[in-house]
Image (spheres, rainbow, N blue to C red):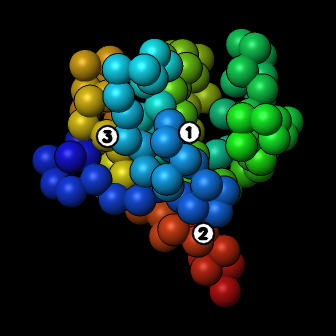
Amino acid sequence: MNVLGTELLECSTDPLTGWFRDGSCRSDSGDRGSHTICAVMTEEFLDHQRSIGNDLTTAMPQYRFPGLQPGDRWCVTAPNWALAHQAGAAAPVVLEATNASVLSIVPLEVLEQHAVDVPPDPRVLLE
């Protein structure tokens, strides 16, 4: 389920995201970071993450991590997203693709403040 109480939608398959690398922000007990928020990367968010020691721009093929750029959708960890929110650098959130389990970490009202409706391929917005 997503934070709206409906079916969890896909976050991204290009780049392929998710704890299980299946495009979805699904999680299990092994996911200590809670990769449950489907966020749209911004330069500000990526810079903030790098400043707290979470470099999301450098590829790490051994973890099937391509490195991210602004506009990419990615299942980010709830605690790190919350830190970015507190610092005024939160990335936009795709609510329908954000796992309901995040609500034990980040309130829905906070996620809604950053809600964005972005198609799976944001390049269509440039057409």
Read off the residue under disc 1: 91
Q: Which of marks 3 and 2 is nearer the N terminus?
A: 3
Query: Farthest residue in the right direction?
Result: 58
Q: Residue 25 in the image: x percent, y percent?
A: 42, 43
What number is the disc on residue 12? none
Front-lying residue, 38 or 60: 60
Read off the residue under disc 3: 99
The C terminus sits in image quarter? bottom right
Q: Residue 94 in the image: x percent, y percent?
A: 41, 51
Residues at marks 1 and 2 touching, judged by CB atoms closer than 8 Å: no
- Where 102 falls versus 92 (above or below)? above
Q: Which of marks 1 and 2 is nearer the N terminus?
A: 1
Q: What element carries label 1?
A: loop
Q: What residue is rendered at 72% in x and 35% in y?
A: 63
Q: Residue 20 in the image: x percent, y percent?
A: 49, 42
Read off the residue under disc 2: 122
Under mark 2, the amino acid is: Pro
| Residue 93 appears anywhere in the view | no
- Where 102 falls versus 11 (above or below)? above
